[in-house]
Amino acid sequence: MLCKKLHHAAYRCRDARETTTFYTEVLGLKFSHAM
Protein backbone atom coordinates (compact mmCIF):
# COMPACT_ATOMS: atom_id res chain seq x y z
CA MET A 1 0.00 0.00 0.00
CA LEU A 2 1.40 3.40 -0.99
CA CYS A 3 1.11 6.46 1.23
CA LYS A 4 -0.96 8.97 -0.75
CA LYS A 5 -1.80 11.52 1.92
CA LEU A 6 -0.59 12.51 5.37
CA HIS A 7 -3.10 14.54 7.37
CA HIS A 8 -0.85 15.86 10.11
CA ALA A 9 2.79 15.53 11.04
CA ALA A 10 4.50 17.39 13.86
CA TYR A 11 8.16 16.58 14.32
CA ARG A 12 10.92 18.47 16.04
CA CYS A 13 13.87 18.55 13.68
CA ARG A 14 17.22 20.28 13.37
CA ASP A 15 16.72 21.27 9.73
CA ALA A 16 13.17 22.09 8.64
CA ARG A 17 14.18 22.48 4.99
CA GLU A 18 15.79 19.03 4.93
CA THR A 19 12.72 17.51 6.59
CA THR A 20 10.39 19.21 4.07
CA THR A 21 12.57 18.00 1.19
CA PHE A 22 12.35 14.42 2.47
CA TYR A 23 8.54 14.44 2.67
CA THR A 24 8.02 16.18 -0.67
CA GLU A 25 10.79 14.77 -2.87
CA VAL A 26 11.43 11.33 -1.36
CA LEU A 27 7.89 10.42 -0.27
CA GLY A 28 6.19 12.51 -2.95
CA LEU A 29 3.75 14.25 -0.60
CA LYS A 30 2.49 17.78 -1.30
CA PHE A 31 3.53 20.53 1.12
CA SER A 32 0.62 22.66 2.28
CA HIS A 33 1.37 24.63 5.46
CA ALA A 34 3.94 25.27 8.17
CA MET A 35 3.75 27.23 11.41
Image (cartoon, rainbow, N blue to C red):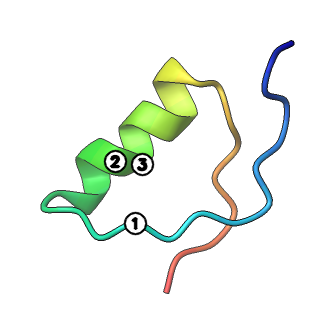
Mark 1 crowd level (few <14, some 14–19, many ≥20, 10 Å Cα)? few
Mark 2 crowd level (few <14, some 14–19, many ≥20, 10 Å Cα)? few
N-term mark: 2 or 1: 1
Report how far apart the C-alphas of labels 3 and 1 lie in the structure.
Answer: 11 Å
**Rendered position, 35 above or below 4:** below
Could you say where residue 15 lies in the image, as x and y percent from the top left?
17, 57
Quarter of the image with the N terminus is top right
The residue at the point 34 percent across, 47 percent down is: 19
Could you say where residue 14 lies in the image, as x and y percent from the top left?
13, 62
The reply to whether callout 3 and callout 1 are in contact (CB within 8 Å) is no
Q: Is residue 14 left or right of residue 4?
A: left
- The residue that label 2 is drawn on is 19
Amino acid at the residue labelled 1: Tyr
Report how far apart the C-alphas of labels 3 and 2 lie in the structure.
Answer: 4 Å
The residue at the point 81 percent across, 16 percent down is: 2
Q: Nearer the viewer, residue 17 or 2?
A: 2
From this viewpoint, which residue is outermost toward the top?
1
- The residue that label 1 is drawn on is 11
From this viewpoint, which residue is outermost toward the front?
1
Could you say where residue 24 lies in the image, as x and y percent from the top left?
55, 35
Where residue 20 is drawn, which disc sits there? Answer: 3
Please tell me whether mark 1 sits on a helix, a strand or a loop.
loop
